[in-house]
Image: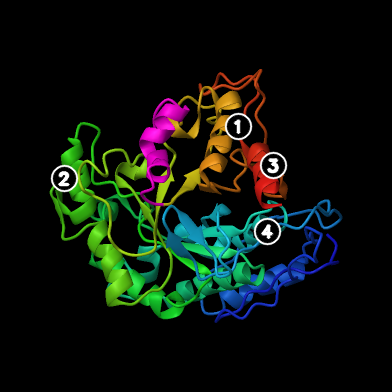
Amino acid sequence: MGTGGSFPVATWRGSVTPAGPARSGQRFSWRFNWRGLLWTAALVLAAVAVPVVIMPLGDAGTTAAQASSCGKAVGPFTVHGTKVLAKNGSVFISYGMTVSGLQEGNWTQLIPLDLAKIAATANDWCANTVRIQVNQDLLLGPNGTSFNPEYMAAIESEVSLAESYHLVVVLNDETNFSPPSVRKYQNDPTPGTEIFWKDLTRVYGNDPQVIFDLFNEPRTSVPTMPDATLWRLWLDGGTFEGVYYPFGMARLADYVRNTVGASNLFWIEGPRYSLSFAGMLRYHALLHTSNIVYSIHHAQGQHDVKDWNANFGYLVTDGIAPVVNGEFTNYEPPPNPKVHVMPQYCWTNAPTAVPQYLQYLASLGIGLSAYQLVPGWLIKSNQHLDEPTAINPKTWSCVPSHEPQPYQSAGALIMAYFEQHNG
């Protein structure tokens, strides 16, 4: 392995000396410095007595091709009707990537790869935003009564690196990866969620480049639940599967904005894993906290304009609020019939529907956060974060073990979309 080039270096309290953003007219690429990579991990994990596994991230003898410079946005960001405006008054549309290493139990081992993904998001994918998923329990413990300074340092290192590349940073509160016994009590916001945002607001509540994604995929629901109950639980809390949730998204948003004083733009995810906002107006569930963008995930339905309008597009076309697709992915399931893949993750009509979907988002000015730089989803391998996977219309299949050409995904379509609209 070579030692040429440099790797962005993360530090304890947010001071980062990166390789630097691209010069005007270029999309920067760099070679990995393995000594720098080890130093990066050591600095971030200095107080953590665990082994660090450095995953192979790239070939030191190759660099990605130069490309045109890509747009960046500068906050603070404010909502005006159905649009989000940046500091200079221009419309801000998020083109981004989710980075999820910090949500995992082995987060200490995944930091180097996270840092590489953040750099690739800026330099190779022509994005202006990175969404960093943060595990509430890893920071505060399952009851929200402890605090892990090493984990907080890791959050700060990733945010600092992203900001050094002039990316907008979305911090997402994630509870899906807790043990099942804990997860049952975190299907909706809890008092621990309030403590989480109180702590994050102390650091980022006045950072104009940071957006708060308040709660990942609220899930106090079952498929047979009446819509009136679904929206009541999401909005105000209540009892679900024997667990009492003292409040919902309305109080959480109000608390973070008005009690702890966060000035950030908020992304708000809907009920039932944020698959749809249909019914929000009918059941009087629109939030009244300022500077809110509604974030759809993996929209359900038939994957056509009619269902997209019904699930979230109406919020824009009817002049109600801005929308972002906070998580989008489209990939074939692994060639293993025992692996369960959510239907929203693989569209049977993806070769035609995904380009139509991207065109639909662009027509309404709706941003997109792709999920995520993982082999088989958006990329071919961790060694080449700039090489997307593609969809072959002749061999695309959503049936595990029946894919003539497995490991296809919308990666190349996403990369081209970002370059077209943010290049």
In terms of sequence position, does the residue under pointer 1 or pointer 2 come before the other?
Answer: 2
Q: Which mark is residue 355?
A: 1
Is residue 195 visible from the viewing direction of this image?
no
In terms of sequence position, does the residue under pointer 4 or pointer 3 come before the other?
Answer: 4
Distance CA(mark 1)–CA(mark 3) = 10 Å
Residue highlighted by disc 2: 241
In terms of sequence position, does the residue under pointer 4 or pointer 2 come before the other?
Answer: 4
The type of residue carrying mark 4 is Gly
Give the secondary structure at mark 4.
loop
Is residue 118 visible from the viewing direction of this image?
yes
Distance CA(mark 4)–CA(mark 2) = 46 Å
User: Which of the pair 10/53 is nearer the observer?
Assistant: 10
Q: Is residue 37 magenta?
A: no
- Within 10 Å of disc 1 (Cα), the crowding (few <14, some 14-19, many 20+) is some
Left or right for 121, reference 102: right
Q: Is residue 302 magenta?
A: yes
In terms of sequence position, does the residue under pointer 1 or pointer 3 come before the other?
Answer: 1
Image point (40%, 73%), residue name: 263
Instruction: Give the x, y percent position of residue 9.
Output: 68, 74
The type of residue carrying mark 1 is Pro
Residue highlighted by disc 3: 416
Distance CA(mark 4)–CA(mark 1) = 22 Å
The type of residue carrying mark 2 is Glu
Residue highlighted by disc 4: 71
